[in-house]
Amino acid sequence: MFKKILIANRGEIACRVIKTARAMGIQTVAIYSDADRNALHVRMADEAVHIGPPPANESYIVIDKVMEAIRQTGAEAVHPGYGFLSENAKFAEALEAAGVAFVGPPKGAIEAMGDKITSKKLAQEAGVSTVPGYMGLIEDAEEAVKISNQVGYPVMIKASAGGGGKGMRIAWNDDEAREGFQSSKNEAANSFGDDRIFIEKFVTQPRHIEIQVLCDSHGNGIYLGERECSIQRRNQKVIEEAPSPFLDEATRKAMGEQAVALAQAVDYTSAGTVEFIVDGDRNFYFLEMNTRLQVEHPVTELITGVDLVEQMIRVANGEALTIRQEDVKLNGWAMECRLYAEDPYRNFLPSIGRLTRYRPPEEVSVEGAIVRNDTGVYEGGEISMYYDPMIAKLCTWGPDRMAAIEGMRAALDSFEVEGIGHNLPFLAAVMDHPKFVSGDITTAFIAEEYPDGFEGAELDDASLRRIAASCAAMHRVAEIRRTRISGRMDNHERKVGDDWNVAVEGRSYDVTIAARRGGATVTFDDGSSVEVASDWTPGDHLARLDVDGSPLVLKVGKVSGGFRVRSRGADLKVHVRTPRQAELAQRMPEKLPPDTSKLLLCPMPGLIMKINVEVGDEVQEGQALCTVEAMKMENILRAEKRAVVTAINAAPGDSLAVDEAIMEFE
């Protein structure tokens, strides 16, 4: 077995590989850029080598720099993780020439299947049903428009070397095809060092289901079930699960056997994933093969008990698979939520900064429940603008789908992240969405269910009453503490009353609290009562309560006269007042937000790539104004209404912070 492995990656996947290597008794080498000098994967590895400036095309994807790190440390093998150089045939070739093992497939398989154009041609030759499209290289935007019309809108514009949602755009007309081609080309060049683009028909209302395969160099190949990856935003997966709630055993077997046959046709070894779209009648069509470990591999590990990273290392070491197809059993259900540094209240735009608080739920593995959190960050660390915005992958397992969902709900409620925008509220809202719970999902789920973006979950009256009762009980505890600290209770100058008013989400509840040891009975003015039990103390950021016998977890922050409470995707201000205070509060004027309707504000920290207009131009609704790049993604900002540009405050190459004014209008 190898004595030392270099991980040619960063973040959570580098940490994930280090954990398995450590368990196998293998030493690890991390590589890092200037931006990652203090990163978690650097801390975890036995050795670390600096390889350059923050941009990936000056550090992580520069083959010569990675090869130099290998030479310096004497690493015998390299695990590429995903993204970066994981599907780069030239990198695999360089490793082979240096006598270093690549923990992945051979160069020929990468060239054949890692390139999406070549893989589709091979699949067609092998008789595999594929999505209609144009597999040739596309030279410019006008040719992209011509081809898009031939294929028929809507079309998917994709980077040949792409992955992770990078270099992908959906176009519904000529203008979107023209813009999408250029943005995809730019993103592909920046993320993969390969700007080749192809176009295929975008199949509406599909499910995205993929098969995990594992092959060795001795002719053995197996599939380890499927993953449902239909919950996607901007072509990037957000929530995955295994198995799929849609497949039956016959379809699973057919897809699995076809995936293995395709892999073996190109002498594939290591772990890989064959992706399909599946229609409502369970007809499936080959999309592409990812010749690497997938981001969502943990859900497969949780339902099969197979450590895919360990198997990849063993296959790279020349060992034969000890697992046969008949040994693969799918046990229970697993969910994965990708926690991104993206603000759901600002249309999921990237957010960067320092993690002032990062407290994931405790990882557990007990009978009937597993919580796993794959992460590459820590409290106090920085989220950089240079890399993918994923912070962590939160996974849960249960004996069935509802148990896995309920476990995920509890885990999300107790996951504390502060300092940056993040998508925890959105993930929690999806876990409660009736269509998701039923399993009735397609890749259009987010676009259909949140067409105007995400503005927070709306809780029903029963949920709001539970929160109101909990906050009333917590407020009374806080008031008692305050009076004791001031000494007023000892002097009998003031006692904490029993009657309160709780205001939340436009509702007002008059309640009476009857305190008891460890909790309280909260009675509403309609006569109904709620039993609240908790060991919460003022200052705790997390409140774990029992409300009428059911658990409730609240993230709690202090605001004037009450609490900021976050639960199940809702972000609420809950004011707890005496009856007299509530009466006076009704007379307070409402503070209005500032008028920014005549400004184009930078929606995220990023780099201005292009300004499309000049001072004096009249712009129309929907017209492109400028392009901002952040976290390897290009974002085109458009006019919301007809206006005249009166000032432009930024130029290409400028780095802007959130809400800096890019241009002004009249």
Image: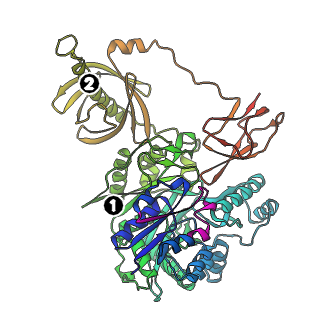
Quarter assignment of residue 578 = top left
Q: Which mark is residue 536?
A: none
581 sits left or right of 88 in the view: left
**Which of disc 2 and disc 1 is earlier in sequence?**
1
Q: Residues within 10 Å of mark 2 (few under 14, many from 20)?
A: many
Q: Position of residue 37 (x, y in %)?
A: 50, 55
Depth check: give the residue in front, 81 or 274. 81
Q: Secondary structure at mark 2?
A: helix
491 sits left or right of 422 in the view: left
Q: How is the structure coloured here?
A: rainbow
Range of residues picked out in magenta: 45-66
Magenta span includes 65: yes
Q: Residue 520: tell me if it is visible.
A: yes
Q: Residue 86: tell me if it is visible.
A: no
Depth check: give the residue in front, 537 or 607. 607
Residue lying at 53% horizontally and 63% vertically, measured from the top left: 208
